[in-house]
Image (cartoon, rainbow, N blue to C red):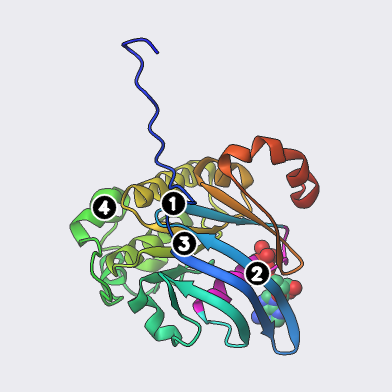
Amino acid sequence: MTATETPTVSVRPARNSTSPQLKVRDLEAWYGESHALHGVDLDVYPGETVTLLGRNGVGKTTTLRAIMGIIRKRKGIVEFEQNSIMRVPLHKIAHRGIGFVPEERGIFASLTVNENLTLPPVVAKGGMSIETIYEIFPNLLERRMSPGTKLSGGEQQMLAIARILRTGVRLILLDEPTEGLAPVIVERIGEVLKVLKSHGVSVLLVEQNFRFASRIADHFYVMDHGQVIDNFSVSELTSRTETLNSVLGV
Ligand SMILES: Nc1ncnc2c1ncn2[C@@H]1O[C@H](COP(=O)(O)OP(=O)(O)OP(=O)(O)O)[C@@H](O)[C@H]1O
């Protein structure tokens, strides 16, 4: 290395050096009598961005919903920071430090951006201030008095992520944040996820947009038929291209 070259510093969290922040083992879930998850195993390490990949209907959203306890008919192991959350009621999950941004985003149409932002209670220490959030999302600052109905899809997605950051969560489960968004907005969501990473927030992401996911994720899990069938780090991505092509059709 010459004097002008700077060494590359990896910000990727080391998987072996710490305990997983989220540990999921043999997670099964049902919609009524319909068995949707057949034993999902995955880990999210502190500060990681982890992406769940898979074709439509393989159980990615169901995995997030089962981790949160939105789906009550479930069994297996779900531990967050070494404590089981299987018996924690849904309304208490945020207090443990986990936030969920569903695909439908859940923005209150009649409330302004600022009201939407301040509505969820702060439930854990370390939440971002409104000022910091507006620094990260300057577009939301500009639109702070606009009602939810007037926001574009991209603005709604950013608001949905932003309001969770205020609550102090340390892990965000994010369901298809780029769906239906223009490429320039997708790019912006990617930047936001990098900012979250720099703040130490871990993300478990469900994403159909493989190119987007490949730029931001540290680790990948591939699902099929309600199970994880493969997992690999971003450094192994190139060598997995063939498998991914056949499983995902990317
Ligand atoms: N509310 C529901 N009631 C009954 N079955 C459901 C429900 N939601 C999903 N399913 C079924 O559970 C299975 C897994 O669906 P899930 O939405 O988790 O898949 P996914 O991988 O997230 O795909 P997609 O990208 O299409 O959402 C599918 O067979 C789906 O039809």
Q: Is residue 195 left or right of residue 23?
A: left
Mark 2 or 3: in front is: 3
Is residue 98 or residue 23 the one in the foreground? 23
Is residue 142 or residue 221 the one in the foreground? 221
Give residue 40's mark.
2
Give the magenta part as a residue range: 55-68
Residue to which mark 1 is pinned: 17
Q: Total number of numbered labels?
A: 4
Residue to which mark 4 is pinned: 142
Instruction: Tell whether label 3 touches label 1 (CB within 8 Å).
Output: no
Q: Position of residue 127 (x, y in %)?
A: 25, 65
Residue to which mark 3 is pinned: 20
Measure the C-alpha gap from mark 3 to mark 4. Answer: 38 Å
Quarter of the figure with residue 92: bottom left
Measure the C-alpha gap from mark 2 to mark 3. Answer: 15 Å
Residue 3 sits above or below residue 193 on the image:
above
Q: Residue at x 61, y 79 (%)?
A: 76
> Looking at numbered disc 2 in the image, what kind of residue is underneath it?
Val
Residue 65 sits above or below residue 132 on the image:
below
For ligand 1, tell me if the residue under mark 2 lies within 8 Å.
Answer: no
User: Residue extending furthest right?
Assistant: 246
Q: Quadrant of ligand 1?
A: bottom right
Q: Secondary structure at mark 3?
A: loop
Earlier-in-chain disc, 4 versus 1: 1
- In what quadrant of the picture does the N terminus appear? top left
Dominant secondary-structure state across the stretch colored magenta: helix
Q: Is residue 97 left or right of residue 36?
A: left
> Looking at numbered disc 4 in the image, what kind of residue is underneath it?
Glu
Earlier-in-chain disc, 2 versus 3: 3
Give residue 195's mark.
none
Quick one: label 3, few (<14), some, or many (20+) residues within 10 Å? some
Residue 179 appears in view: no
